[in-house]
Each structure stands twice: as C-alpha cells, then as structure tokens.
Image: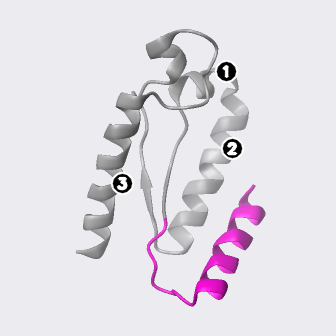
Amino acid sequence: HKNNLTTTFADFYERTGCKDAPIIACGFTDTYCESVPEASEAVLKAIVECVDAVGGGFVDTTGLHSNSQNLGGGDIYHFSKEALRMLGEKFFDKYKEMKG
C-alpha cells in the first residue's frame, strides 16, 4: 500500500506540475476498522507515513458513522451523509492549518 500511494503522489505532482499542492487524507469508518483491524491498521499506517512524507495532512475519522450505523444494512465502508459533512469541515480545517 505504501509503495502504491507513494507512486500515486509522485505521479500527481509530476502530471500536474503542482509541487506545492496540499495532500490531505483520512481514515476509514470505525465499523470497517473493527471488521478488519490488522489490515486497516496497516493501511492507515502507510497512509499517514506517505502523507507525512509529502508534507500533507491527515484527518482523523474516529467516531464518524458509516451508513450501516445510521441507516442499517451492511454498508460499513462508506461514511453517512452527516459524517461526510463533518469530514468536509475537518478537511477544510486541515487545509487552513496547512496553508497558515
């Protein structure tokens, strides 16, 4: 995962020419992390390391509900509508923090 993400970031910077574009990433839903704890922990570690390497920011998603938590059903992967609004605010706050 780390190699793929590092390559993706490098390709983005090369193709766009935006060497100072901020990269902001986030975690997964709690329900997903609980379903595959070892895998999600490894991927999150790789994401944080890659984002740090390019001077980016990471947004914590702990406590943000998945669709399954709000609507029922089995969608543990995607954030609920309310969680996405909160995540958007977190991304914007991280962007402001990074841009000073």
Question: Which label is found at residue 50?
Answer: none
| Display colour scheme | one colour
Q: Mark 2 points at which residue?
A: 42
Question: Disc 3 to disc 1, how far (Cα)?
Answer: 25 Å
Secondary structure beneath label 1: helix
Question: Which label is found at residue 91?
Answer: 3
Circle nearer the viewer, 3 or 1: 3
Badge 2 density bin: few <14, some 14–19, many ≥20, Cα 10 Å: few
Q: Which residue is drawn at 30% across and 57% down?
A: 92
Badge 1 density bin: few <14, some 14–19, many ≥20, Cα 10 Å: few
Q: Which segment is the magenta one?
A: 1-23
To which quarter of the image does residue 9 belong?
A: bottom right
Residue type, label 2: Ala
Question: Disc 1 to disc 2, how far (Cα)?
Answer: 14 Å
Question: Relative to the observer, which residue lies in front, 81 or 2?
Answer: 81
For residue 91, side relative to residue 35 (left or right) = left
Q: Which residue is drawn at 51% across and 86% down?
A: 18
Residue type, label 1: Ser
Residue 93: x, y in percent? 26, 56
Quadrant in the picture for the N terminus: bottom right
Residue 81: x, y in percent? 41, 30
Residue positioned most to the top:
72
Upstream in the sequence, badge 3 or badge 2? 2
Residue 21: x, y in percent? 46, 79
Upstream in the sequence, badge 1 or badge 2? 1
Circle nearer the viewer, 3 or 2: 3
For residue 55, side relative to residue 43 (left or right) = left
Q: Mark 1 points at which residue?
A: 35
Residue type, label 3: Phe
Q: Residue at x 60, y 10 (%)?
A: 73
